[in-house]
Image (cartoon, helix red, strand yellow):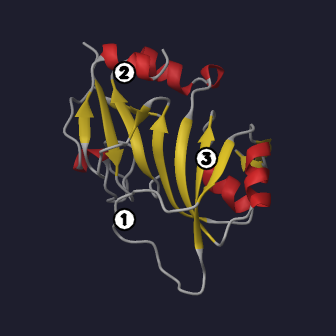
Amino acid sequence: MHQYFIVYKPFNVLSQFTSQEGKLTLKDFFSVPVDLYPVGRLDFDSEGLLLLTNDKSLNHRLLDPEFAHEREYWVQVEGQMDQAAIDLLRSGVSIAVDGKLYKTRPCRAELLTDAPPVPERNPPIRYRAHIPTSWVKMVLKEGKNRQVRKMTAKAGFPTLRLIRHRIERISLEGFLPGEMREIRKQEIYPLLGL
C-alpha cells in the first residue's frame, strides 16, 4: 500500500535515511516505514518541504523534467538585491551543471519587501550589521543540483538561507522544522496536479 508524508526537513540534515560522516539524516527526525524514501532532495544546508513515499509512479512524475511542476523557494541572500538582479534571475542565467554550462529556464522571481514568516534557524544566519540581506521568492519548474544557490550567486547575491516552501499546491504553511504529516493519495495527487 502506498503511503505519503509531507515533512519539513530541518537545516543541516541529509535528505536520506542513512548517515554519512555522522551527519544528521531524516531518520533522526521522522519515524516512517523502511520502504519510504524522499522524492527528490534538498541539500544538507537547505531546508523545507520534502515528500516521502513508496509510490514509484509519483516519484517519476515529480522528478521527470517533462512534467515541469512548480517549486517555490524563499531565499535570503547577502546584499540588497535590486531589480536588475531579479530580471536576470527571471530570464535565466548560465550555471555549471555536471561540469558543463547550463542556461536555466525562465522562472518567476520577486523581491519580498518583508522577511517571510519563517521559523528561526538553528544555528542562526551569521548576522553582520554592515551587510544588509534581502529575501527573494523564486518559482522554478526544474531542479538542477544546487540550482537556486548558483543562480543567486551568478546574479551577485550569495544565498544565506534557502527554504523550499511549496511544490505545486502543497506548502509548508503551518509546519515547523522536523514536523511531518501523513496525507492520502486522494489528497496529494490533485494538490500536485496529477
Q: N-terminal of the two: label 1 or label 2?
A: 1
Q: Does 107 appear above or below 79?
A: above
Q: Residues within 10 Å of mark 2 (few under 14, many from 20)?
A: some
Marks 1 and 3, how far apart at CA? 20 Å
User: SS of the residue at dot 3?
Assistant: strand
Say which residue label 2 marks: 188
| Percent coordinates x, y for residue 93 in the rendering | 78, 49
Q: Is residue 131 left or right of residue 191?
A: right
Q: Residue furthest front?
A: 113
| Percent coordinates x, y for residue 181 in the rendering | 24, 34
Say which residue label 1 marks: 121
Task: Specify whether residue 161 is in view.
Answer: yes
Q: Is residue 123 left or right of residue 140?
A: left
Res 138 label: 3
User: SS of the residue at dot 1?
Assistant: loop
Amino acid at dot 3: Met
Amino acid at dot 1: Arg
Q: Does 35 appear above or below 1?
A: below
Q: N-terminal of the two: label 3 or label 2?
A: 3
Q: Is residue 25 left or right of residue 105?
A: left
Using the rendered view, name the quadrant where residue 69 is placed: top right
User: SS of the residue at dot 2?
Assistant: helix
Marks 1 and 2, how far apart at CA? 28 Å
> Which residue shows up at 69% across the image and 53% down it?
151
> Which residue shows up at 52% across the image and 19% down it?
61
Using the rendered view, name the quadrant where residue 80 is placed: bottom right
Marks 3 and 2, how far apart at CA? 23 Å
Q: Does 10 appear above or below 140?
A: below
Q: N-terminal of the two: label 1 or label 3?
A: 1
Res 70 label: none
